[in-house]
Image (cartoon, helix red, strand yellow):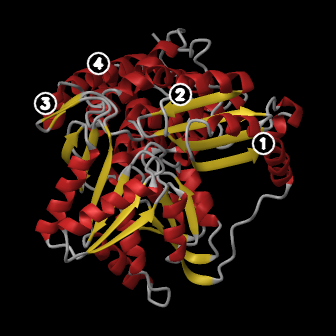
Amino acid sequence: MRQTINGADFRRLMISAAAAIEINKQKLNELNVFPVPDGDTGTNMSMTINAAAADLRKAEDPSLEKAAAISASAMLRGARGNSGVILSLLLRGISRKLKGAENCDGVLWAAALQEGVDAAYKAVMKPAEGTILTVARLAAAKATQAAQENNYFEFVHEAAIEEAQVALANTVNQNPVLKKAGVVDAGGKGWLVALEAMMSALRGEDIVVPEGMETGDVKEQADFSDFDTEDITFTYCTEFIISRENDKDPEALRAFLSELGDSLVLVDDEEIIKVHVHTNDPGTALHEAVSYGSFVTVKIENMRLQHTEKVMSEQEMAPTIAEPEKPFGVVSVCAGKGLADVFKDLGVDGIISGGQTMNPSTQDILEAVNKVPAETVFVLPNNKNIIMAAEQVDALTPKHVVVIPSKTVPQGVTAMLSFNPEGTEQENVDALTEALSTVDTMQITYAARNSDFDGYDIHEGDYLAMYGSALFGTSRDIKVLLRSLAEKVRDEGKSYITIYYGEDIQEKHAQKAADLFADICPDADVNLLCGGQPVYYYLISAE
């Protein structure tokens, strides 16, 4: 039985934990009860901890303090989603406790686990039972008890695992939603997977991602200088959407394009065919495609030219933190060119591409903040799963960062309407925060998995409507949901309605949705805008 661990041991433990979470990330994702497509727990935890594993692999024979510090720093910057942020905070506390130590015994490890729990609880405004916090807290408490009995690292860690298993099993009883679905908490399961993988590595059975599943070291962005333009087989990235105007089989188009290039993705329904393909002859691709119907959108990009420009850009000196030219600036998270244009028109200085299914990391938000030439930068996360990642940025930059806890894009837009560049910081904090409660958000997306949720028998592929954070309805017909939402808005007496339609909705169909709202809500001002957002067919704001 191992009495202590050193820096090399800690490095192996962390790399094994990262591999185990990567292997199990889909299983963790599937524990998420709510069936909407989102930045799932397993994916966020995997990307967060693999940021640490990537840096640890580069570290040669680190001390215990150094290995822990590398892990904490990488995970802080790479943290994605609430689960990823909490995981990074657990490691931040552990790192803080291991500072100055050459070896870690059972007593120190128990104290480190508790320090991690304290750091995580401190960052969560309203900790709920039946989550990763519960599992980590009870495991750390058990470790503390075990350390009083036996000071061996392995003994203490094993006690923590045993308690984590019990605590995880009980999460199903602590959270009504989990209880109804009959599953345990995904974040808590992820922490248990990490602890168990650490034990395996400690006993000489390192967890390794199977060949063929490996994604390699996690990078915040690719190093484009790693390959030449000659490595690009096909020059043009070609994307288009065509409206289906005849009975020609899209599979024939798929077969034609597969012979013309690679990286082919073709998705079709009764109304459109959406295509992405890399080819040297986009003209031929478009000529064949137009025989199926009229083009809705077309985009062709020269990947060789983009690669050359990217390499030249990366070889330039990295920009320093922008010098303040004004007291206040704003960055906003959103996905979709139309939504980005809306925020820019309202005075936002920087856009962070992301949102549902694409939770930006703390590093992504930090880089956007640093580019804003202002002393204080307000951040609009516009998604509840991004707020915690944004809140970590203030400690990483000399700029003062203020996070306005917007949970939806319509909330972010309404907050910007209240922004006053000439006001004081507190006046803006009060105005922007107060504005969040003045707007109701409705969203229509699709069910990512089968689910029995809140009285709804949901099937994969169903349209889902949400009003605020609650599930409002489900149907195989999107018009049914639009009508029900419009009636809800009318009954609530809303006066201003803005409909943002997504990238998979044609303008003519979006106009019909707007007309429906106008007919049902005759006293309201209805506006239609192309948001271009993925995942959500419609984002609807009502004030």
Of the two numbered discs 4 and 3 on the same chain, state the one appearing first in sequence: 4
Mark 3 secondary-structure assignment: helix
**CB under 8 Å between callouts 1 and 3?**
no
The image position of residue 533, as x and y in percent, is 47, 53
Q: Which of marks 4 and 3 is in front?
A: 3
Q: Nearer the viewer, mark 1 or mark 4?
A: 1
Total marks in image: 4
Of the two numbered discs 1 and 3 on the same chain, state the one appearing first in sequence: 3
The image position of residue 535, as x and y in percent, is 42, 45
Checking the image for residue 162, the label placed there is 4
**Could you tell me which residue is drawn at 53 percent across and 73 percent down?**
348
**Amino acid at dot 1:** Met
Estimate how packed mark 1 is, as few (under 14), some (14 to 19) or many (20 or more) residues with alpha carbons within 10 Å. Answer: some
Q: In the rendered view, does 279 fall on the left or right side of 55?
A: right
Tell me the quadrant of the picture where the C terminus can be found: bottom left
Residue position marked by numbered label 2 in the rendering:
250
Residue position marked by numbered label 1 in the rendering:
303
